[in-house]
Image: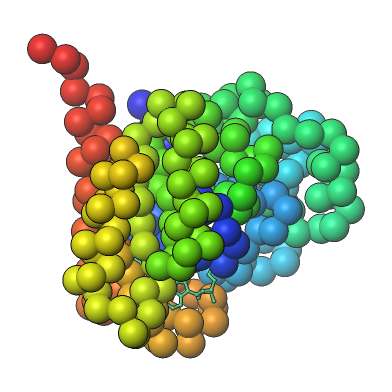
Amino acid sequence: MTKVIAVHSFKGGTGKTTLTANLAATLALHHRVGVMDLDLSGPGLHVLFGLKKGEVKATMTDIFLGDATPSDVIIDLTPRFPKMKGGLFFCPASNKVEDMLRLLKSGLEVSLFQDTLQKVGEQCNLDYIIVDTHPGVENDTVLAMGCCDVLVLVSRVDQQDLFGTAVMVLLAETFEKPTFLTLNMVPPGVRIKDAVKVGKELATLFKSRFLQAFEFQMDVINNLSRSVFVVDNPDSSFAHKINEAAEMLTNELAEATQPAN
Ligand SMILES: Nc1ncnc2c1ncn2[C@@H]1O[C@H](COP(=O)(O)OP(=O)(O)OP(=O)(O)O)[C@@H](O)[C@H]1O
Ligand SMILES: [Mg+2]
């Protein structure tokens, strides 16, 4: 069965979309992976995957508005990434203001999202679907948290972010989902081993697990979201860290499906 990984943060701009795209591309080296844009009021994944205007026929937004079915929305990106021995299938969100406004009025239906995850998973025979979300406590957050198997919470090493992350952990607890804390954009003034220590302590405090600490990297920000960084830089330290995070998540999800003795 397809396993769902949701990527979320309390504050905006923590690196959710960047990490989602890079994790998806890494997982797709060996697995069949869906990547879904559930940031319905601020989508960005289509930019990193380099989609051209005419390539998007229908979107996740259209599904929620009742104007499309899951099969209309899926875009097979696999042929663009020859190193991906699994597969990469993308479900974009609409970046049209009128669609976003319509959706604000109509709201989101949990059963429709669950059905979409199931259909996309079955149709593309996926091992994983990784879902990018809008920051904070929004309808799509609750939807993603409720429907995922694992939640990745991204935070900067910043008091505002960390207090907000504690709020998200409390929300995640109500859904009883395994939660992984990821620190991103660790500034040059903070030693990475100190960030890891703090991350591990916070993860314990938050009754979650520590996933990874990514430094703030000039080459990542200088990429200007023009592509998926690990695809162009597979030997970078960022790619190694993404790889470790992907392995930890797949192990967690494999364990979760082991029958209890
Ligand atoms: N580790 C990093 N080092 C340097 N820059 C990074 C790093 N991670 C992400 N970025 C950059 O930070 C910016 C914001 O990242 P991104 O769009 O992924 O955040 P987000 O959490 O999805 O934002 P939003 O909440 O608006 O959806 C981008 O320019 C991205 O390239
Ligand atoms: Mg984003």
- Left or right: 163 in relation to 59: left
- Left or right: 84 in relation to 74: left
Judging depth in this view, the residue of 185 and 70 nearest the camera is: 185
- Left or right: 48 in relation to 155: right
- Identify which residue is drawn at 64% across, 26% down: 110
- Identify which residue is drawn at 73% across, 53% down: 41
Judging depth in this view, the residue of 54 and 139 nearest the camera is: 139
Judging depth in this view, the residue of 54 and 66 nearest the camera is: 66
Classify 260 as above or below 199: above
Locate residue 71, reporting x and y percent.
61, 37
Locate residue 179, reporting x and y percent.
36, 40
Judging depth in this view, the residue of 20 and 195 nearest the camera is: 195
Q: Quadrant of residue 106?
A: top right
Classify 107 as above or below 82: above
Classify 183 as above or below 38: below
Locate residue 235, reporting x and y percent.
23, 77
